[in-house]
Amino acid sequence: MSDKISAKEVIVGVIVLAVVGAAMFYTLSVFNAESGQKVIDISQQGDKEASHIETHVKLTAIDPIKGDASARFEFVPSDNLLAEDGTLKQELKLYVNSANGKQEIDFAKGKLMTPVEAVFNMHGGQGDAIPFLTNTSPTSTSISPRES
């Protein structure tokens, strides 16, 4: 056996490294695309109104064993609901069908609309079907002027 590496061994080594590198690049690309932000317009009815609040919902955690999905709600009020300093001109109340925690959240006049976290029940999936699990989690939110 000789200590010299033949050209054939170098070529095979380079090909193996290229295949492993391509497989790693593909895998990391798939994971990166999967975790990318996806936005779905649920309803744009309120956009036509002068006073509306754009709501962005971002899933923060999913627990298929417990059957819970956690989501963060972020709010962007229209300009006529905001004072010059970016705070609310009037008191608002958010109603959300959270499975635990607060279901009615008050936003005070003169304060910012801070993000809200809610937990929803998931339906329709079996915890042992991972990674091919499909669930639904119906949500319902409503924001209205707060009654004194």
Image: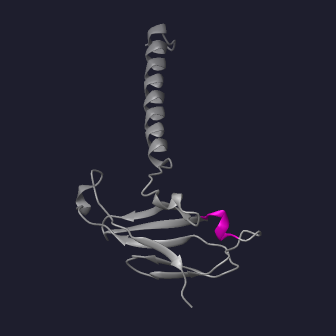
Give whichever of 122, 110 is nearer the camera: 110
**Residue 79 falls inside the magenta stretch:** yes
Depth check, front residue: 44 or 49: 49
Left or right for 13, reference 123: right
- Picture quadrant of residue 99: bottom left
Q: Position of residue 75 (x, y in %)?
A: 57, 66
Residues rendered magenta in the picture: 77-82
Residue at point 64% right, 70% down?
81
Q: Residue furthest right?
A: 85
Q: Residue furthest bottom?
A: 148
- Tell which of 17 and 71 is nearer to you: 71
Q: What colour scheme has been applied to the protein in the rendered image?
A: one colour
Quadrant containing the N terminus in the rendered view: top left
Question: What x and y, as percent, mark residue 31?
Answer: 45, 44
Q: Is residue 90 left or right of residue 126?
A: right
Q: Is residue 84 above or below residue 108?
A: above
Question: Residue reaching furthest top?
Answer: 7
Residue found 33% across the figure and 66% down from its top: 138
Q: Nearer the viewer, residue 11 or 67?
A: 67
Image vertical order of residue 9 relative to residue 121, above or below: above
Label tally:
0
Answer above or below: position of 96 versus 34: below
Q: Is residue 130 above or below residue 1?
A: below
Q: Position of residue 109 (x, y in %)?
A: 66, 81
The quadrant the C terminus occupies is: bottom right
- Magenta-colored stretch includes residue 115: no
Q: Position of residue 13 (x, y in %)?
A: 46, 19
The residue at the point 42 percent across, 57 percent down is 42
The residue depicted at 40 percent of the width and 76 percent of the height is: 98
